[in-house]
Image (cartoon, grey):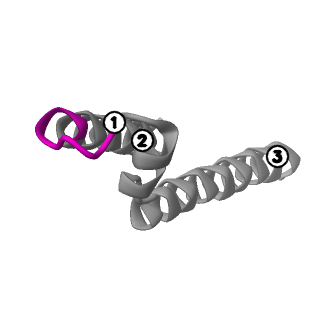
Amino acid sequence: MLGWWLLVGSLVVEVAEANARAALLAALSKNADFSAGTWLSMWTPPYLAVLTGLGLLTFARITRAGTSMREELEGVV
């Protein structure tokens, strides 16, 4: 659950922050407009947060597989 929270949450926060920066720039500047190009130039993907979230999801999957293998082994022995 923590991996999904970090993965989705970091992307949502970064999109909202880029949107707010582009809107602020459009409001304070006379020659900049609020468009998709301005928004994309303000957006920087949160690589570290995304990789950490994917790592947590991978670790959870490995742990879940190990737990099921352990339970199967206890049932056999």
Q: Position of residue 67 (x, y in %)?
A: 66, 49
Left or right: 20 with respect to 1?
Answer: left
Which secondary structure, mark 2?
helix
Which mark is drawn over residue 28? Answer: none
Residue type (three-letter) at the residue carrying disc 2: Leu
Residue drawn at (49%, 53%) of the image: 53
Alpha carbons under labels 1 and 2: distance apart: 25 Å
Which secondary structure, mark 1?
helix
The crowd level at tag 3 (other Cα within 10 Å; few <14, some 14-19, many 20+) is few
- What residue range appears in magenta? 26-33
Left or right: 76 with respect to 13?
Answer: right
Judged by depth in the image, the label closer to the viewer, 2 or 3, is 2
N-terminal of the pair, mark 2 or mark 3, is 2
| Location of mark 2 (residue) | 2
Dot 1 and dot 3 residues touching (CB under 8 Å): no
The crowd level at tag 1 (other Cα within 10 Å; few <14, some 14-19, many 20+) is many
Alpha carbons under labels 2 and 3: distance apart: 27 Å
Residue drawn at (63%, 58%) of the image: 58
Dot 2 and dot 3 residues touching (CB under 8 Å): no
Dot 1 and dot 2 residues touching (CB under 8 Å): no
| Location of mark 1 (residue) | 19
Which mark is drawn over residue 72? Answer: 3
Residue type (three-letter) at the residue carrying disc 1: Asn
Q: Position of residue 42 (x, y in %)?
A: 36, 54
Residue 2, compared with residue 43, is above or below; it is: above
Q: Position of residue 18 (x, y in %)?
A: 33, 44
The crowd level at tag 2 (other Cα within 10 Å; few <14, some 14-19, many 20+) is few
